[in-house]
Image (cartoon, helix red, strand yellow):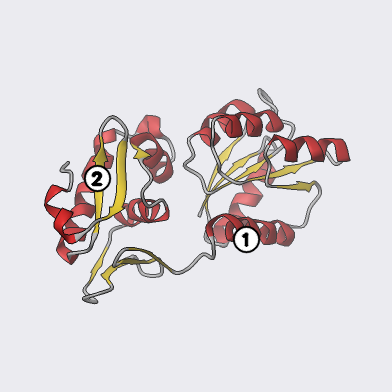
Amino acid sequence: MKILIVEDEFALADALRDRLTQENYDVDIASDGVSGCDRAMTGAYDIVIMDGMLPGKDGTEIIYEMRKAKVTTPVLMLTARSSLVDKLKGLDAGADDYMTKPFEVEELLARLRALIRRNYGSEDDVVRAGNLSLDRRNASLMNSDTRQTISLAGKEFKILEYFLENPGKALTREQISERIWGNADNVEYNNVEVYVSFIRKKIKFLKADVCIRAVRGVGYRLDVEAVNDKETTAKD
């Protein structure tokens, strides 16, 4: 799971990132409200941990803007604001959970696990679509009908995992770049096209009933397709 921490206390943000990384989360940090809002708005994260008092833009305001823009990423507010009024403002703005500082890290981890279960189901070692199964433990891809298996390289694995977590949803090149490389501004979009091409070839090799279609002017979408539809699968 990919987590965004929006926190202006550098020591706290670094400590949280280190602990969450130990728990096998992929973590990015934004240290002010403006950059935090920009990143949260991409929809490229599975969870956002949001401070309340931030330079540039208030955490509650960011959450309100996310929900207004239909960004549904679960948000855990982690803030020193402990009054009932502040909690109600945060929750009413669209926060999914609310914790106050100081806090116990183990409780934070438990609340994150609860948010993940509530929004994504259990974090299974295997994610599936159609007869295609991706094993997160060893980055292997399998046709569950034929049991034929193939390995994926690092970026291929992360991109396909992202598609499999969002079946039928059009993902923009910006979202994919942000998710995989962390900063879409520093990545050429043709990198995304190259890796999608690699993944398509491996799916075709496995003769799976899944395809990654190009969505004109947007990006790509993973679909489960009927066998007769494979000839019409979009090309790069």
Which amino acid type corresponds to the residue marked 2 in the rendered image? Answer: Arg
| Residue farthest to the top, as pictured | 56
Which amino acid type corresponds to the residue marked 1 in the rendered image? Answer: Arg
Question: Residue at horizontal 58%, vertical 30%?
Answer: 37
| Residue farthest to the left, as pictured | 231
Count the labels in the image. Answer: 2
Front in this rendered view, residue 14 or 133: 133
Quarter of the image holding residue 93? top right
Image x and y of residue 179, in percent: 42, 44
Quarter of the image holding residue 221? top left
Q: Label 1, label 2: how many angstroms apart (C-alpha)? A: 32 Å
Residue 105 is labelled as none
Question: Residue at horizontal 70%, vertical 38%?
Answer: 51
The residue tagged with tag 2: helix, strand or loop? strand
The residue tagged with tag 1: helix, strand or loop? helix
Image x and y of residue 208, in percent: 22, 64
Question: Residue at horizontal 55%, vertical 56%?
Answer: 21
| Residue neighbourhood size for the residue with mark 2, other residues' Cα within 10 Å, grouped as few (<14), some (14–19), many (≥20) | many
Q: Would residue 177 be visible to someone looking at this image?
A: yes
| Residue farthest to the bottom, as pictured | 147
Residue 193 lies, with reference to residue 230, above or below; the image says above
Image x and y of residue 144, in percent: 28, 73
| Residue neighbourhood size for the residue with mark 1, other residues' Cα within 10 Å, grouped as few (<14), some (14–19), many (≥20) | some
Quarter of the image holding residue 181? top left
Q: Which residue is mark 1?
A: 113
Front in this rendered view, residue 34 or 146: 146
Give the quarter of the figure containing the C terminus: top left
| Residue farthest to the right, as pictured | 83
Question: Residue at horizontal 36%, vertical 51%?
Answer: 163
Q: Which residue is mark 2?
A: 213
